[in-house]
Image (cartoon, helix red, strand yellow):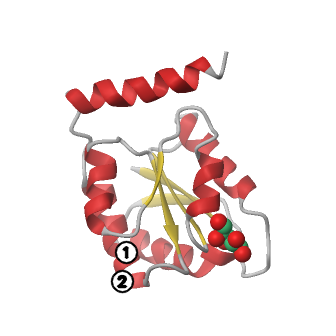
């Protein structure tokens, strides 16, 4: 499994903690930055990770900003991306089982590092349930295709 990581200044420290977690668990990743707490604009980081996942270069993406919201909105503009902002482990599990989320977004200013890493673990270890959920995910894709002609 290969993970694309991205963040703005508001998510920099959390991204670093996630990198350590991935290294400890021998999960490979590429870090698309930013790599300091200096102020940057989050949309390009959401876009870079979204494109990397949508093009099939990475299995999944994990992105962080202050709230997880702005960078997730940007990632979700990339066709094929289903990015979920998650602040609890139940939603982490469901976003994979029911929504087949391929990008996880976390807010460094919203949750602590301990919870964030538990969310990452849950999210990475949960498989898509398919079946009726696949039909619903396909309906989401149809909406996307309607506007991408
Ligand atoms: C940056 O100050 C902040 O707006 C950003 O990290 C994020 O929370 C946006 O949604």
Q: Is residue 139 above or below residue 45?
A: above
- Which disc, if any, is residue 114? 2
Task: Please tell me which residue lies in front, 145 or 33.
Answer: 145
Quarter of the picture holding the C terminus: top right
Question: Are the residues at dot 2 and dot 1 in contact (C-beta closer than 8 Å)?
Answer: yes
Q: Which of the 4 image quadrants contains residue 34?
A: bottom right
Q: Quick one: SS at disc 1?
A: helix
Q: Is residue 17 above or below residue 41?
A: below
Q: Position of residue 36 (x, y in %)?
A: 72, 79
Q: Which of the 4 image quadrants contains residue 9?
A: bottom right
Q: Is residue 46 visible?
A: yes
What residue is drawn where x is 49% and y is 72%? 19
Task: Please tell me which residue lies in front, 26 or 141.
Answer: 141
Q: Position of residue 87 (x, y in %)?
A: 40, 69
Q: Is residue 1 above or below residue 22?
A: above
Q: Please give left or right for residue 61 compared with residue 91 in the image.
A: right
- In the picture of the structure, the residue carrying the numbered disc 1 is 117
Q: Quick one: SS at disc 2?
A: helix
Question: Which quadrant of the frame does ligand 1 lie within?
Answer: bottom right
Does the residue tagged 1 have its C-beta within 8 Å of any atom of ligand 1? no
Q: Is residue 8 visible?
A: no
What residue is drawn where x is 74% and y is 54%? 44
- Which disc, if any, is residue 99? none
């Amino acid at each position: 499994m290969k993970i694309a990581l991205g963040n703005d200044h508001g998510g920099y420290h959390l991204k670093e903690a996630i990198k350590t977690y991935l290294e400890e668990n021998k999960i490979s990743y590429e870090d698309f930055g930013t790599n300091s707490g200096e102020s940057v604009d989050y949309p390009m980081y959401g876009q870079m990770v979204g494109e990397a996942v949508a093009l099939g270069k990475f299995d999944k993406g994990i992105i962080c900003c202050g709230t997880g919201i702005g960078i997730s909105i940007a990632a979700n503009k990339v066709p094929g991306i289903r990015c979920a902002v998650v602040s609890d482990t139940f939603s982490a599990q469901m976003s994979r089982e029911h929504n087949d989320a391929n990008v996880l977004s976390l807010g460094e200013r919203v949750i602590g590092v301990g919870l964030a890493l538990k969310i990452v673990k849950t999210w990475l270890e949960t498989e898509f349930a398919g079946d009726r959920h696949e039909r619903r995910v396909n309906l989401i894709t149809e909406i996307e295709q309607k506007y991408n002609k």
